[in-house]
Amino acid sequence: MIVTVTLNPALDKLLTTDNFRLNQISRAEEIILEPGGKGINIGYALSVLGHEVVFMGFVGGRVGDYIEEKLRNFGLTTNFVHLENETRTNIIIVDAQRKTQTQINEPGPFVRPEEMERLKQNFARTLGYAKMVVIAGSLPPGVDPFHAVELVKMAQAKNVPVTINFSEGPFAETIKSHPYLAKPDIRISPTFMGKPMKFKRKRIEVLKKLTEEASIAMLNLGFESYIASRDEVYEVTAPVCQVASTVRINDALLAGAIDALLEGKGIAEAGRKGMATAMAITSSLKGEIESAKDVEVHLDRVEVRKIET
């Protein structure tokens, strides 16, 4: 099975509206509530692709109960630590007319040291059954990067490969532990490792630097993705496709790549499967995939090109 650890889950509250404008009243036409947080999103996609997934992390209050109940109603296995404080809610405003998407993320609840300790204990018991661990998303107040590093090292001590997906601060610390697969979250900052991400050459430089620490590294800006090992770099692109929401595009991309790698595929095919999964999930406003067939129909449409470095 695959274990996903979401240290800062969220309830994603998606509001659809037309002609959304700042400083004016807008009315929501549709309200969608879905469990969110990068580890949860990745785990959901992996479960649709046929993997048994255990969802771990922190949930709290009525919002946390809702998230756990919703996942279990999907037939998924959860093993969360329950906090005294309430799980966060993220607001996503989708304007179909203007084709814009605005997202406001709460910081999350404070995690007490004893709550972190309970997570580590539960995590240790689960590792004996794991074939992959995915630790992804933002860190809530009270959780420092060294806590994520501890989880990585615990998995590695049991010979379980680890995938990490964090923003630059926690990512810079956890990649020093030499994970199997590393994908930084570069959605917000225009630079990463001091390099501007708008330039393709700089993205490739970052990728090669990441593979000095991780066996495989990924990077993407929307539907433009890169995947690399120490010996190879591939650029992966998608054709023009219908997009309802991009909330889960990055997480689906990583989930598809993990699926291919666990099947023994090379990094080129991992990049292809990742992009096909991203295409499938962004066609749904809720970020849902009905079955693995929804991903398979996109595989031949994805372009994978080896980059000579």
Image (tube, rainbow, N blue to C red):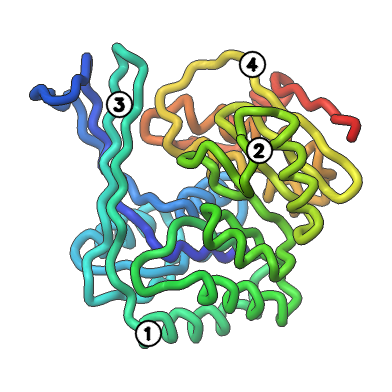
Earlier along the polypeptide chain: callout 2 or callout 4? 4
Q: Nearer the viewer, mark 2 or mark 1?
A: 1
The residue that label 3 is drawn on is 94
- Between residues 94 and 276, which one lies in front from this camera angle? 94
As helix, strand or loop, the secondary structure at mark 3 comes to strand
Earlier along the polypeptide chain: callout 2 or callout 1? 1
Q: Residues within 10 Å of mark 2 (few under 14, many from 20)?
A: many
Q: Quadrant of the C terminus?
A: top right
Q: CA distance from mark 2 to mark 4?
A: 14 Å
Verify CB contact (< 8 Å) between mark 4 and mark 3. Answer: no
Q: Position of residue 43 (x, y in %)?
A: 52, 54
Q: Residues within 10 Å of mark 3 (few under 14, many from 20)?
A: many
Tell me the kind of residue under disc 4.
Answer: Pro
Earlier along the polypeptide chain: callout 2 or callout 3? 3
Q: Nearer the viewer, mark 2 or mark 3?
A: 3
Tell me the kind of residue under disc 3.
Answer: Val
* Residue 254, image quadrant: top right
Earlier along the polypeptide chain: callout 4 or callout 3? 3
Q: Nearer the viewer, mark 3 or mark 1?
A: 1
Tell me the kind of residue under disc 1.
Answer: Pro
Q: Which mark is residue 227?
A: none
The residue that label 4 is drawn on is 239
Q: CA distance from mark 4 to mark 3?
A: 22 Å
Q: CA distance from mark 3 to mark 1?
A: 37 Å
The residue that label 1 is drawn on is 113
Tell me the kind of residue under disc 2.
Answer: Gly
Q: CA distance from mark 2 to mark 1?
A: 36 Å
Residue under the image location 36 percent in, 74 percent down:
142
- Between residues 170 and 163, which one lies in front from this camera angle? 170
